[in-house]
Image (cartoon, grey):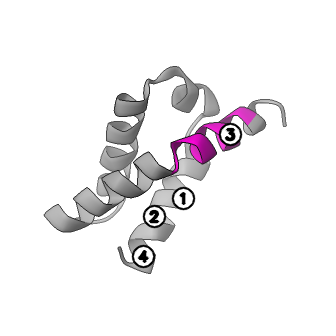
Amino acid sequence: MTPNIMRQFWSVLETAHSKTLLQMDDASLVQWLVRQTKMQTSLDYSETAYLNDYIKSRLTLIRDLAHERLYF
């Protein structure tokens, strides 16, 4: 995954509403984050697959960050 894609993903995550992130189940959250990132930057099949795996491996972190933002 390129640094640009990584930046786009984290930008999407930072601008997403915490309640939105916390309301979805894992599969829906992964799909939503991939879709939102794809709207920001063009991804080929392998980049999409890698981003999908990357998000899955960081779901706990993503949910923790969203939960923390609810209270600040």
The answer to whether marks 4 and 1 mark residues whose Cβ atoms lie closer than 8 Å is no
The answer to whether marks 1 and 2 mark residues whose Cβ atoms lie closer than 8 Å is yes
Is residue 64 magenta-colored?
yes
Dot 1 corresponds to which residue?
Answer: 11
Measured in 3D between alpha carbons, the distance from the residue under mark 3 to the one under mark 1, in whole angstroms, is: 16 Å
Select label 3 or label 4 by which is in front.
Answer: 3
Dot 3 corresponds to which residue?
Answer: 64
**On screen, residue 4 above or below 66:** below
Question: Looking at this rendering, what residue extends furthest in the top direction?
Answer: 23
Question: Looking at this rendering, what residue extends furthest in the right direction?
Answer: 72
Q: Earlier in the sequence, mark 3 or mark 1?
A: 1
Disc 1 crowd, CA 10 A, few/some/many (<14, 14-19, 20+): few
- Residue 20, which numbered label? none
Measured in 3D between alpha carbons, the distance from the residue under mark 2 to the one under mark 3, in whole angstroms, is: 19 Å
Dot 2 corresponds to which residue?
Answer: 8
The answer to whether marks 4 and 2 mark residues whose Cβ atoms lie closer than 8 Å is yes
Measured in 3D between alpha carbons, the distance from the residue under mark 3 to the one under mark 4, in whole angstroms, is: 24 Å
**On screen, residue 12 above or below 5:** above
Measured in 3D between alpha carbons, the distance from the residue under mark 4 to the one under mark 1, in whole angstroms, is: 10 Å
**Identity, as a three-letter code, of the amino acid under mark 4:** Asn
**Identity, as a three-letter code, of the amino acid under mark 2:** Gln
Q: Earlier in the sequence, mark 3 or mark 4?
A: 4
**On screen, residue 15 above or below 23:** below
Tell whether 43 sits left or right of 57: left
Dot 4 corresponds to which residue?
Answer: 4
Count of numbered labels shown in the rendering: 4
Q: Image point 35% across, 73% down: which residue? A: 1
Is residue 21 magenta-colored?
no
Residue 5 at x, y = what percent? 39, 69
Q: Which residues are magenta?
A: 58-67
**Identity, as a three-letter code, of the amino acid under mark 1:** Ser
